[in-house]
Image (cartoon, helix red, strand yellow):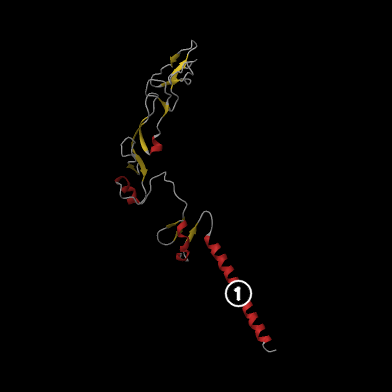
Amino acid sequence: MDPRCDQTEFLHQNGTCVECPVCKPGEQLSGDCGFGYGGDGVCILCERGTFSTVTGVEPCRRCTQCNLLNRHMLTDCFPTSDTMCGKCLPGRYYELKSMTGEVELLCIPCESQDTLHKECRSFASRGSKAPFIESKSNVFFLTTGTSIPRGQNSLNHESELHPASIVINVTTNIKPCSQKQDNIMQDGQTGFNTEENLAKILSSVFSKF
């Protein structure tokens, strides 16, 4: 019966379990090893964009990308060390997601009217937003005053538009639709009045007999 090898052992040709080759920081095995498999792998340098800080059989890990965390990059990633990220980029503020402190503070993009966080006050005073904020699809009605964003919840406020307003919509034009509906309603009312008049005429004619 073959012996059951550990997670860091491979089955040797002589039938015994042998420890997998151990790699130093900045290296990893060229092939998987453990639970009886492997054994022919050798230590090689971590690939570009990966690193390893321990001695063992663990594979190299992917380097941290500071830009995805909305942070400044202090030091680059090396085979023996991960990227070191610094403070939040301009227009971001820290937010704690874990009460244990084991998780790093997240850098959240500032909103244009955010005056609660000190990192966002300068952006709020300029009325600007931090870059890379994904904007929602809105319709803007431009008048002589301030532009007002409109979303799906404001479809019932069509009567609030002024005649001098300019409608900007990348998908549909609202005004022709409303005009077409008005024409349909007018045609229906005209037809209704014609039938009503005809009925009155016929009624007056038959009443004479």
- Assess disc 1: are there few (<14), some (14-19) or many (≥20) residues with their C-alpha within 10 Å of its C-alpha: few
Residue 87 position, x and y percent, is 32, 37
Seen in the picture, residue 152 relative to 198 is either above or below; the reply is above
- Residue in the foreground of this view, choosing between 7 and 133: 7
Count of marks, rendered view:
1
Residue lying farthest top?
A: 14
Residue 130 position, x and y percent, is 38, 45
**Residue at the spot of label 1:** 190
Q: Is residue 88 left or right of residue 62?
A: left
Image quarter of residue 99: top left
Q: Is residue 182 left or right of residue 68?
A: right
Seen in the picture, residue 61 relative to 4 is either above or below; the reply is below
The answer to whether residue 42 shows anywhere in this view is no
Residue 170 position, x and y percent, is 52, 54
Quadrant including the C terminus: bottom right
Residue lying farthest bottom?
A: 208
Mark 1: amino acid:
Thr
Image quarter of residue 100: top left
The answer to whether residue 9 shows anywhere in this view is yes
Seen in the picture, residue 152 relative to 99 is either above or below; the reply is below
Task: Look at 47% across and 64% down and name the residue there.
Answer: 158
Task: Look at 48% across and 60% down and name the residue there.
Answer: 155
Residue lying farthest right?
A: 209
Residue lying farthest left?
A: 118
Task: Look at 45% across and 59% down and name the residue there.
Answer: 154
Residue 91 position, x and y percent, is 35, 44
Seen in the picture, residue 123 relative to 160 is either above or below; the reply is above
Q: Secondary structure at mark 1?
A: helix
